[in-house]
Amino acid sequence: MSMTMDETAQATGRRGLSWASPGRARGAAGAAAAMFLVGTLTAVSPALHHYPVYGGQALRYAAGGLVLLLVMRARGTPHLRLDRRELALVALLAVTGLGAFNVFVIEATRYAGPATVGTIVATVPIVLALAGPLMERRRPTPSIVLAALVVAGGAALATGLGGGTPLGLLLALGALACEVAFSLLAVPLLPRLGAMRVSAYATLAAVPLLLVTGLVADGRDALRVPTVPEAAALAYLAVVVTAVAFFCWYDALPRLGPDRAGLFSGFLPIGAIVCGLVLGTGHPAPADLLGAALVIAGLLLGLRPRRPTPWAPAA
């Protein structure tokens, strides 16, 4: 069961996360696993280069949502009736964090290099370090903002720098905004619905949007029967990168808070680097290793507990 934001605040005591916090280790492990797994999608993407992009994403989310529903049924997790506010948030989450994010990323790479797009999206820890606390009506923590800058710098270094047109940069900024929405829009839903329901409902809600986008972009060719390698790649995306990663991320958010959880997005390029090594499809350059080291340093900086303020008796 996910912790509420109030319970998280009590556990952290507003002085930084305590190692004794019951959900801290689980939250950190979940956030790291989620971002690492999402980073591995670069290993299977080549298998889908000839499959219609938007139709493929629709299949991915449909299958991933089905997996989540089956897990809910196996665990005996009941469905809850959503009120209007929750329906609106789930719809916005699906439209922005899932559907529009894919559209922005795909279209941005037509006008800018993948490295440029990745570098811009890698700044998400900075945005979450500032926006997350403001949503909770508290000041951003300076140490976490500094840590976010370090993590973003490391992720950008590992991703690499590139060029692009103004339109490409604008589309990449749209992808960044959608990536932030993927976390912030879920925060008010998690206390009542929990990570499993939010993951399942948002994933399934994104399917119609991607299908419509695919029909507009590719017509009747938006969907076709995948080949065996394509089916394997889609299955991996659906089960690992969607169902497992989404649940891990949404389970971690209320345990860490959006600002600290955002630091773990630095694991995206690390997942890509490690997966490339395992599959023999890539070898890390010195910049990749230095970027990974910066990400780890930023995480250690952002997750360390702050020193308690010394107590002095009143005179």
Image (spheres, rainbow, N blue to C red):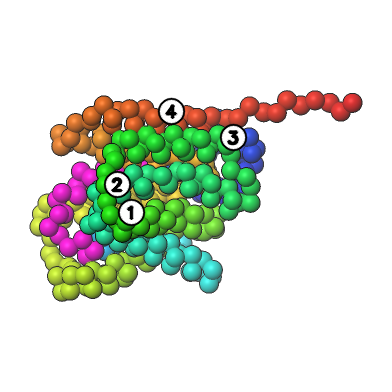
Q: Who is closer to the viewer here, 37 or 99?
A: 99
**Disc 4 to disc 3: CB gap under 8 Å:** no
The 10 Å Cα crowd at callout 1, few under 14, some 14 to 19, many 20 or more, is many
Q: Is mark 1 on a helix, strand or loop?
A: helix
Q: Is residue 112 left or right of residue 35?
A: left
User: What is the CA distance from the residue labelled 2 to the residue labelled 4?
Assistant: 23 Å
Picture layout, residue 190 above or below residue 308: below
Residue identified by numbered label 2: 116
Please tell me which residue is depicted at 65% across the width and 37% down the height of the picture: 13
Eye-nearest disc, 1 or 4: 1
Q: Where is residue 137 in the image (x, y as percent from the top left)?
A: 63, 51
User: What is the CA distance from the residue labelled 3 to the residue labelled 1?
Assistant: 35 Å
- Residue 215 seen from this side: yes
Q: Who is closer to the viewer here, 62 or 120?
A: 120
- The tag on residue 169 is 1
Q: What stretch is highlighted in magenta?
A: 34-55
Eye-nearest disc, 3 or 1: 1
Q: What element carries label 4?
A: helix
Q: Who is closer to the viewer here, 27 or 173?
A: 173
- Residue 202 seen from this side: no
Amino acid tagged 4: Ala
Amino acid tagged 1: Leu
Q: Position of residue 264 (x, y in %)?
A: 42, 39
User: What is the CA distance from the residue labelled 1 to the residue labelled 4?
Assistant: 28 Å
Amino acid tagged 3: Gly
Residue identified by numbered label 4: 297
Residue identified by numbered label 3: 16
User: What is the CA distance from the residue labelled 4 to the residue labelled 3?
Assistant: 17 Å
Please tell me which residue is depicted at 58% across the width and 39% down the height of the picture: 141
